[in-house]
Image (cartoon, rainbow, N blue to C red):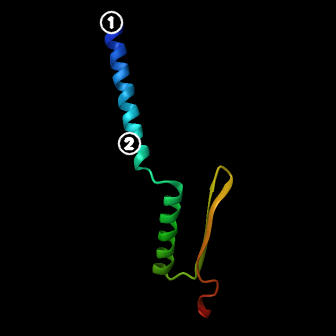
């Protein structure tokens, strides 16, 4: 195998990886969208499971990026 066809194959493979990576990134939700979806799911779970309430937080690289409480502090007094 000569160097030219090998280089061309590597270039085509690298381009394929780049295109695939871009499409995967385009499909990934933003952090804000992911946190919003997580909050909706937690609210639905609290209501469906009939728990009093929960508090949740998400940390990224040691920083608290989101925190929220769901439900009731005193379920009997609601």
Name which residue lies at 45% across and 79% down.
48
- Quick one: 58 or 19, which is closer to the camera? 19
Q: List the single residue furthest toward the right.
A: 62
Number of marks present in the image shown: 2
Residue labelled with disc 2: 23
Task: Tell me where residue 1 sits by quadrant.
Answer: top left
Image height of 12 relative to 77, above or below: above
Residue labelled with disc 1: 2
**Mark 1, secondary structure of its residue:** loop
**Residue 58: x percent and y percent?**
61, 60
Name which residue lies at 58% across and 82% down.
52
- Quick one: 64 or 50, which is closer to the camera? 64
Of tags 1 and 2, which is closer to the observer?
2
Pointer 1 or 2: first along the chain: 1
Name which residue lies at 68% across and 52% down.
62
Q: Residues within 10 Å of mark 2 (few under 14, many from 20)?
A: few
Q: Residues within 10 Å of mark 1 (few under 14, many from 20)?
A: few
**Residue 2: x percent and y percent?**
32, 6
Say which mark, if any, is on residue 44: none
Image height of 51 relative to 14, above or below: below
Q: List the single residue furthest toward the top.
A: 2
Name which residue lies at 35% across and 25% down.
13
**Mark 2, secondary structure of its residue:** helix
Measured Cα–Cα span from mark 1 to mark 2: 32 Å
Quarter that holds the C terminus:
bottom right
Q: List the single residue furthest toward the bottom.
A: 77
**Residue 51: x percent and y percent?**
54, 81
- Quick one: 46 or 39, which is closer to the camera? 39
């Amino acid at each position: 195998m000569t160097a030219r066809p090998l280089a061309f194959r590597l270039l085509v493979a690298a381009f394929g990886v780049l295109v695939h990576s871009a499409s995967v990134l385009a499909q990934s939700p933003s952090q804000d969208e992911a946190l919003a979806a997580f909050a909706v799911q937690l609210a639905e779970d609290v209501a469906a499971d009939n728990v009093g309430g929960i508090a949740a937080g998400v940390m990224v690289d040691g920083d608290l990026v989101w925190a929220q409480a769901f439900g009731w502090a005193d379920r009997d007094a609601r």
